[in-house]
Image: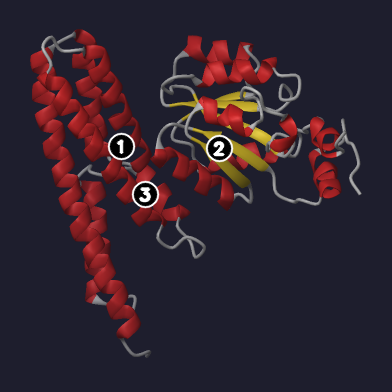
Amino acid sequence: MRMASSSSSFSSASMAMGDEKPHVLAVDDSLLDRKLIEKLLTNSSCKVTTAENGQKALDLLGLGDGQHALNSIASKVNLIITDYCMPGMTGYELLKKIKESPTMKDIPVVIVSSENVPTRIKKCLDEGAEEFMLKPLQKSDVNRLRCQLTKFSNPHKGMLCMGR
Amino acid sequence: MEGSPLLRQVAHQRQTLFDEGLLDEQFVQLEELQDRTNPNFVEEIVTTYYQDTSRLILNIEQELERRPLDFGRLDGYVYQFKGSSTSFGAKKVKAECSLFREYCRAGNGEGCMRTFQQLKREYATLKRKLEAYFQLARQARLTQTASPPG
């Protein structure tokens, strides 16, 4: 039986859902970087889905055109990590679309970049990114994120699972 | 066995890659990520790196044949090359990419072409030495499993 959880901590929400590992959506146009982030996250006991660009990420989240959130992984994602520099839709543009979505806006988004540009960092944080991190990510970065995941909660996790 | 000459040779050859500045700490991170659940992780990453970079080399070569040079597009490819090289831990190649990007931003075609030649040389050296090291490491693993205990 599933319970709606809005403000409970991550651990009780996940226990109610029956899954134990946080689910991370990682977005990067570089195959090498996707493989790297996936390994870092799975080594940290996370479930990982990867997407090679912003549009595919939106499709997975059920925010693509004509889609319904119920068919997506949206209800299960605890964190989105996206590269900043991607052809087509940048990580910043993806962040904006996520924050504009009533169903997705509370999912924490972390932006990663190989370039340390203060104006870029500020722009992303102002738009609601949880953090801005430099690539390549290290084990210590992922450990920190993993700890913070226990504080993040996806308030819609329970609601979407209840169905209509 | 730990003290075997072959294993010592492997360790020495690996260390040389770092001492000569071909690889940096990032490569060690990759090695540390490899485990029993994914015992071929490093090999997989190496293969992906070669695939990415050989494609980018072709792209850059094509760009360098354009007249006039499109420094924006060129920089885009070098940016990707640098990104992959950084994530892989290819220290010297990454440095050449940084230099290449500077020439792109300065709109210096001759500098770009010269640096590209250097980049290709460093890249070829890295590949050659990495392959030699991996081959030796494989040989050592085979020898280890074949040798009797004690």
Asked where in the image residue B120 lies, by quadrant, the reply is top left
Kindly tell me whether residue A139 is visible in this rendering: yes
Q: Same chain for the residues at labels 1 and 3, yes or no?
A: yes
In this picture, residue A113 sits left or right of residue B14: right
Q: Is residue B48 above or below residue B11?
A: above
Secondary element under disc 3, as helix, strand or loop, is helix
Of the two numbered discs 2 and 1 in the rendering, the one whose residue sits closer to the viewer: 1
Position of residue A33 measured from the top left corner of the image (x, y, whole percent)? 43, 38
| Numbered marks: total | 3
Position of residue A137 measured from the top left corner of the image (x, y, whole percent)? 48, 37
Q: Residues within 10 Å of mark 2 (few under 14, many from 20)?
A: some
**Residue denoted by label 2:** A141
Q: Residues within 10 Å of mark 1 (few under 14, many from 20)?
A: many
Distance between mark 1 and mark 3 Cα atoms: 11 Å
Asked where in the image residue B89 lies, by quadrant, the reply is top left
Position of residue A112 measured from the top left corner of the image (x, y, whole percent)? 50, 27
Distance between mark 2 and mark 3 Cα atoms: 20 Å
In this picture, residue A154 sits left or right of residue A77: right
Decide which of tag 1 and tag 3 comes sooner along the chain. 3
Q: Is residue B48 above or below residue B114?
A: below
Q: Residue at x 10, y 12 (%)?
A: B67
In this picture, residue A91 sits left or right of residue B112: right
Indicate the chain on which mark 1 is placed.
Answer: B
Q: Which mark is residue B85?
A: 1
Q: Residues within 10 Å of mark 3 (few under 14, many from 20)?
A: some
- Three-letter code, disc 1: Ser
Q: Residue at x 63, y 47 (%)?
A: A47
Please state, as top left, top right, bottom left or bottom right, where the C terminus of chain B lies in the image.
bottom left
Whether tag 2 and tag 3 are in contact, CB under 8 A, the answer is no
Indicate the chain on which mark 2 is placed.
Answer: A
- Three-letter code, disc 3: Ile
**Residue denoted by label 3:** B45
